[in-house]
Image: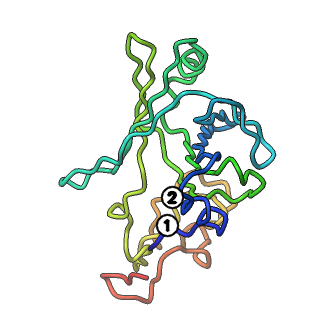
Amino acid sequence: MPLSISSNAIVEKNKMNSDGAWILLLEVIYPGEDPVRACSNNEVVTWNGESWPAYPFKLGDIEESKDGDQPSLSLEVNDLARIMIPEIEARGGGVGAEAWIRIVHSKHLSNTTPEFEEMFEIVSVSIDSGYMIKFQLGIENLMTYRVPQNRYLKNHCRYKEFKGALCGYTGSESNCNRTFARCKELGNQTRFGGQPGVGNLGIQV
């Protein structure tokens, strides 16, 4: 699918020369904390109501392998001032955090929709002796998705959380083996997450 960009971006892209610049915005989101923001620019950028401090970072190319591993790319940050390193160490490297990459144009910062936006997950972090931080970012691998998404079995409940919102059981029992027989014992068969009427192989939707 072709990348859709704004009419302003098309004009800027086709200019022979310009005093504007394409700017990379980085936003790292740690669960339960305020996002950490930065931009690959020589001065602070204000975009979408937020301040994006200037910080030197570089994105690598997307790396893929013939073995079907999760595609990834590197993000390198030069932290000679040791501003980010203590933050990273305090969060155990930040593995699992979301890293959003966006592209905007310096002449059209009033446009709150970025020209490009992609969410990655931090899968590993390393710091060398020269204070260069290297994040490895994982991207979506469609080969890991189950298709069809749902499988309905005759005697097995598809709800993973016992007493959860889908299960709906509110009694005193503390365990369930997710079978229809157990659900019936608990008097909760009307909320059973399987399909007793289908064949032994189940159905996929």
Q: In which quarter of the image is the C terminus?
A: bottom left
Circles 2, 1 touching at the beta carbon (< 8 Å)? yes
Residue 126 quadrant:
top left
| Residue 42 image point, x, y percent | 63, 29
In the displayed orientation, state which residue is furthest to the left.
66
| Residue 199 image point, x, y percent | 34, 88
Residue 176: mark = 2
Residue 40 quadrant:
top right
Q: Earlier in the sequence, mark 2 or mark 1?
A: 2
Would you place residue 178 above or below residue 191 in this image? above
Residue 182: mark = 1
The 10 Å Cα crowd at callout 2, few under 14, some 14 to 19, many 20 or more, is: few
Q: Which of 170 and 117 is in front in this view?
A: 117
Q: Which of 149 and 183 is in front in this view?
A: 149
Give left or right: position of 126 versus 168: left
| Residue 88 image point, x, y percent | 55, 22
SS for callout 2: loop
SS for callout 1: helix
Q: Which residue is drawn at 37% across and 64% down?
A: 142
Q: Which of 173 and 107 is in front in this view?
A: 107
